[in-house]
Image: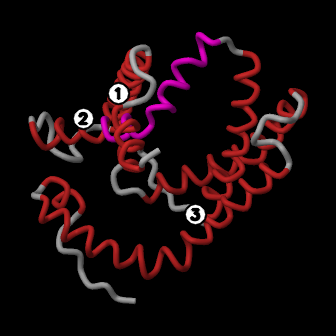
Amino acid sequence: MDYGEPPSTIVQAYAGSYADLFAYNAWRNQFLQWTALPYFRIWNAFGFMLIGMAIFRLGILQGERSTRFYRRFALWTLAISAPLVIYGTLARIGVNETVGPFLGYTKELGLRGVTFLSGCAIGSVFVLAASQLFYRRSNDRLRRPIEAVGRMALTNYVMHSLLFFVYFHVIKAAPFDSLDHDVLLLMTVCVWILQVGFSCSWLSRYQQGSLEGLWRRLSGA
């Protein structure tokens, strides 16, 4: 299906006005809604849902299995998912317009979508098993910061969006798509540390995040 030429490049859209971004996303969503969603994304989501239902029925999600089970489960899923994720990641980097040249890797590999998604699906189960092991072996001092960020997920999501909006569009500290990827990684780590500290501080005074509380009032809970 021919959707025509995009109204601008992605860099021009994000660096321009809201109208520029709206026009670009309207064009892009034609592909997402009429091609990607019915042929690819809905089946990806369905596959992840089946995995979630299976591990719930088996008592894995609830933490009902033994520590030995989770240890073996983590090893097996890591052994299967790691090669798939590494291959899929390299394949995606090789065809990316910015990350590939930055890392000096521009090789095109086949089956990049299938290997990456299947690896992530199996890897998500590994994360579940590893999390169960972590919680059983760690103390409250290690768990509390992670739990705090999770309890304020909505607030933290909106917060980091606002932080980067102010950085790129309000004070215009750097043009969009002008920072190297190592700088972006450093910024991500800094925001994560900020949000961990903020979440712990906030929940020491209040029972839930500000937006979580607002959402609860609006929903009548």
Q: Name which residue lies at 18% across and 69% down.
A: 8
Q: Could you tell me the amino acid type at mark 2?
A: Leu
Residue 113's tag is 3
Q: Give the range drawn in magenta.
A: 140-159
Rendered position, 94 above or below 184? below
Q: Which quadrant of the view contains residue 28?
A: bottom left
Q: Residue 163 carries which label?
A: 2
Mark 3 near mark 2, Cβ–Cβ under 8 Å? no
Badge 3: how crowded within 10 Å, few (<14), some, or many (20+)? few
Q: x, y (%) of residue 218?
A: 36, 48
State how far apart marks 1 and 3 are (Cα): 29 Å
Number of labels in the image equals: 3
Q: Earlier in the sequence, mark 1 or mark 3?
A: 3
Looking at the image, is 90 positioned above or below residue 4? above
Residue beneath the point at 41% across and 23% down: 199
In the picture of the structure, the residue carrying the numbered disc 1 is 191
- Secondary structure under tag 2 reads helix
Q: What residue type is labelled 3?
A: Gly
The residues bearing labels 3 and 2 have C-alpha atoms spaced at a distance of 31 Å
Direction from residue 191 to residue 148 in the image, left or right = right
At label 2, counting other C-alpha atoms closer than 10 Å, the crowd grade (few under 14, some 14-19, many 20 or more) is few
User: Where residue 221 sits in the image (x, y, percent)?
Assistant: 47, 44
Q: Residues within 10 Å of mark 1 (few under 14, many from 20)?
A: some
